[in-house]
Image: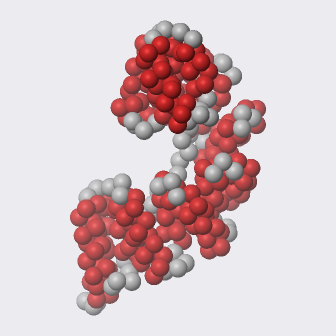
Amino acid sequence: MKSRIKTLIAVLIVGASFSCDSDESKKGRFLLKGNEKMEENDPKSAMAFYGEAIELDSTYADAYYNKALAHLQLNQLTESIQDLSLAIKYNPGYYDATFQRGLNYLDNGEFYNARSDAEKLVQLDDQNWKSYFLSGLVEEKLKNFPEAIAAFKKASELNPENSDLLVNQATILFYQKDYEAAKNILTEAMRVNPLEPHLHNLRSMIYFDEQNYEEALNSVEKAISLNKSQAYFYNNKGLYLLFLDQKEEGLELINQSIKMDANNPFTLRNKGIYYVMQGDKVSALQYLVELDQNHPDMDLVKEYLAKAQAL
């Protein structure tokens, strides 16, 4: 049921201009050839061209930045961070590289490094909403919820038409179980962008916690209609169907979510709940015992582990 906050803004590939056949123009052409390969969804070939540009100029920050984005497209986080660090080394004021490295650190579980980059972004440009956006994401990961909300509010003030920033605030309030405040912010987000799928998914999660399962189902179906690629939307719908006594349909959606993303522990919890509802103690314990050890604060785990043990 986890509502995953968006962490990636559309990245910009840095281009180049040139006018004569010098090393400067040659490296620029390699950069542009690499960009063309990125547009063709061929990051490996793109990296080869960016490497040629770096051969001509080992301090070419833009080539390191674009090469880092190619690594990112191949899910090579460590290599992407290394190239971004080189881009920043040769251009200490490189805002986009610092922002992207901060996001990469977050995805890599390096929260304090991400916080350092967020602080640097504020120093580089305290009027750019992305500086505070990254800060909010970091503080949320560190469970510093008041600081996270304050950062997202600041980002929203600088970019009031970005509904994601409002949804992020509401997500933190949801974590704190302040449902009324969360719903109020979601109402504001609806005015900004009623077609934001994460808004409707979060609303479904609030309805579920309030035991309003029909409304939870309606809201998550709206989210899915707007974005069919989010695995956790299907997992949430599966959970709601379990509680609406449509257990087999619910299990089918939970399994579909696992096929789309095998790394979401909430799918395992939901399968454990399914087996408790089916009276299958052995299968339920296979899921819930380990989850209780690894994710002791996850909602519903202790409740359904106790129910499984009592079967």
Q: Is residue 263 above or below residue 117?
A: above
Task: Write the residue at 46% across / 28% down.
Answer: 268
Q: Is residue 242 above or below residue 13?
A: above
Pinpoint residue 295: horizontal percent, then vertical percent: 55, 36
Colouring convention used in this rendered image of the protein: secondary structure
Pinpoint residue 244: horizontal percent, then vertical percent: 55, 12
Q: How many marks?
A: 0
Q: Quadrant of residue 112?
A: bottom right
Q: Quadrant of residue 205?
A: top right
**Left or right placement of residue 96 versus residue 182 in this view:** left
Pinpoint residue 248: horizontal percent, then vertical percent: 42, 13
**Left or right placement of residue 247 versus residue 38 in this view:** right
Pinpoint residue 69: horizontal percent, then vertical percent: 38, 63
Q: Is residue 199 above or below residue 286?
A: below
**Residue 282 makes an appearance in the image:** yes
Task: Write the residue at 24% across / 70% down.
Answer: 48
Q: Quadrant of residue 119?
A: bottom right
Q: Is residue 186 above or below residue 120?
A: above
Q: Nearer the viewer, residue 235 or 111?
A: 111
Q: Quadrant of the N terminus?
A: top right
Task: Write the residue at 60% across / 42% down.
Answer: 193
Task: Write the residue at 61% across / 29% down.
Answer: 299
Q: Nearer the viewer, residue 43 or 26?
A: 43
**Residue 222 makes an appearance in the image:** no
